[in-house]
Each structure stands twice: as C-alpha cells, then as structure tokens.
Image (cartoon, rainbow, N blue to C red):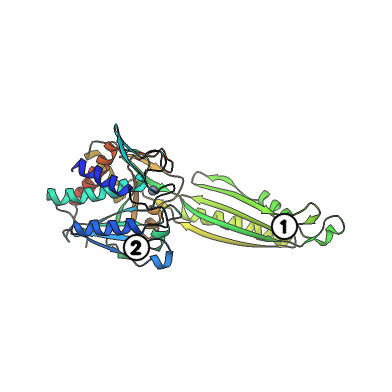
Amino acid sequence: MNQDRLVNQFMEMVKIDSETGYERDMADYLLATFKEMGIEAKEDDTQEKTGYGAGNILVRLEGDAAKAPVYFTVHMDTVAPGKGVRPSVEGDYIVSDGTTILGADDKAGIAALIEAIHTLKESGITHGDVEIVITVGEESGLVGAKAFDAGQLKSRFGYAIDSTGKVGTVVTAAPTQSRIEVNIHGKKAHAGVAPETGVSAINIAARAISQMKLGRIDEETTANIGRFEGGTATNVVTDHVHLLAEARSLDNAKMEAQSNHMKETFENVAREMGGRADVDVEVMYAALSASNDSEVVRTAVRAIENIGRNADLISLGGGSDGNIFAGAGIETAILGLGYENIHTTEEKMPIEELAKITELIVEIIRVQNDKEVEA
Ligand SMILES: [Zn+2]
C-alpha cells in the first residue's frame, strides 16, 4: 500500500461535487479512473428510473475463476453542504475548511478500494473476482442500491464499507423498516350546531393509537407514530387526519406483524366509529442480519485479527445500502472505516483509519484466496 497515493486519491475525490442527486461528475471521474487502471467498470442503466445524477457503477476486477468472489459496496453521493469541498491535512486528520462536509462518508471507502486494487496488482496476490458496486442516492433512501440489479453479482457475500466506528467494527445486524402512511376519513359537521351528524377523524385516530402497541415492542422491534396532522377550527368536526408512522425490527417477520397490527387497528377502529382508514405500508428495506458463524462475519473477523485489530461486532438502529444487498440474498456485513462527525461540517477522516481500512480490504480478499469455489 502507498499511503501518499491513497491520501491524494481521497483528497482529489472529495473535491468533486457529488451531493445526492448530482453524482454525474463523480461517476465520470470514477469511470475514467478505473479505465486508466485497466479495470472493467460499467455504469448501469438505472439513471432513467431514479432520475438521479448517474447510474450505479459496477467494477469487476477479474481474478482466478477457481477462487471465491467477494463484493464490496460504497456510495458516491454525499449530504449537503458538499459543494466546493476544500480538504487539507491537519495533524493526523484530513478535514474540510469548516464550511462544508468533508465527504469521507463515503469517499474514504471508495479511495480505500481503489488503493486496495493498486496494492493487489502490485503485490501479485492471487484472488478471485472482486466486485465493487458504487451507488448513487444512498443518503436519500438507498435509491441507487434499490434500483441496482443484484443478479449481476457473482459473489455470495461481501461488505458495505460505510459505518462509523474504527476499523475492526463490523455491523452484523441492522433493522428492516416500514413507512406507514395513514389517511383517516370521517364526516364533517358543525361542532356546535350538529356534532352528532359528524364523525371526527381526530377521535378515530386518537382511539386507534390508544389501542396500539407502540414504542419498544420487544428486544428487536420498535414502532412509532411520527406525525399527526389534521383539523381546522374549533367549531368543525374534522373529517380528515393524516399520519406517518414506522415499525422497525431486526426480524423481517416481526416488523411485518407490527406493521399489520397498526394497519388493522386503524382500519377496525375507523370502521367501528363510522369512518374509514386508508393505510399504506411500504417496506423501505429488509433487515441485515449476519450470524457470528456466517462466512461473511468469520472472514471479516479473521481478516481484522490478521491486520492487528480487534473485531467489534455491533448492531445498528437504521438501514443502509448493505440492507438492500442483504435483502437481495447476498450475505452482507457493514465495515466501520473510522470517519468522524459525518453529516456535519466538522466531518474528518483519520489518516490512520484510511490506511487501515485499505489494509483490511486487501486482507479480506487475501483471506478469501484460501477458499475454493464450491461446486
Ligand atoms: Zn454513508
């Protein structure tokens, strides 16, 4: 590994504007960079569908066909304010000038992958195919990953490189989540003159919510009503209420059961009270759940120990691109890469962690090398 080349690669990329939805320049830069390296990189055709700045980029580093392939995923978009990033090295860190984010989330991961490929080529380490998916629109709801056709991947498992926590952190569990939109319809009436002719949507919603299991459901499952709006004046029996809610669980079936419970409670109470509830449940992403003895976790732990770090297996409260790939049936864990204060103008990247995540990627690929493809 060449640390100067790695740092320069990272600094160069954070200077390219790529706020979510405006990924074109970054995508073009990546395609040109891989081309220069002599590595196959293709943009998929999802841009039309997503309306974002570019499609996702699939990079394939050809390896020994007898060795097991592994995939990595990172995202090229950043949150705002991410235009005109001016990075500099300050002590052990790379920082922005304080007016923007840095974009280490997730360009540190991209830089590490590029340097890992250089290292593999220069060291002559043999390996199986290495597949890299660089997505767009991660920050606005995993848009690129959702549109990506995971059937293009040969790998049975791999890693999203996109989590806080020092290198050695492995996210093995992240919940599935639903978004529940509720429209409750009652019947309008004058509250002073003829309240008995009306059906209050507010009363329906209130009664339904009071009958619902919410908050902490069990160790793995939570639910919440996040928004409640409707009504006009005190003298009007309200005929419409709009609600937004969610359910999360590390277990897909439990999340589904909780979402159904909420949906049915709204519908039943509305019917009993002479109104109607239209409830729309959307599963945002599936759960990511890799057991400690799964190949994806065992490989990561072994590689982490080989580079002199301790593996720290954790679970997260929210989803990321890794959930989408896990949901597509490809065993996935998320690796910490040590970026700090992400999504703020204080974001910074420790140079040591940037080097260490590169080392870890190379080591994961090297450890993979010991395995043969199963028939
Ligand atoms: Zn990220």
According to the picture, the residue beneath numbered tag 2 turns out to be 150
* 228 left or right of 55 in image: right
Vertical order, 367 against 274 (above or below): above
Q: Position of residue 50 (x, y in %)?
A: 43, 64
Measure the C-alpha gap from mark 1 to mark 2: 43 Å
Label 2, residues with CA under 10 Å away: few <14, some 14-19, many ≥20:
some
- Residue 242 appears in the figure: yes
Q: Type of residue at label 1?
A: Ala
Query: Is disc 2's CB within 8 Å of ligand 1?
Result: no
Task: Name the residue rendered at 43%, 46% in the picture.
Answer: 81
Residue under pointer 1:
201
Image quadrant where residue 216 sits? top right
Task: Quadrant for residue 343, please give it.
Answer: top left
- Compared with residue 90, is residue 103 higher up or lower down, i.e. above or below? below
Instruction: Tell me residue 47's x, y (percent).
Output: 39, 65
| Residue in front for this viewpoint, 253 or 102 | 102
- Identify the amino acid type marked 2: Ala
Question: Which quadrant is the N terminus positioned in?
Answer: top left
Q: Residue lying furthest top in this view?
A: 91
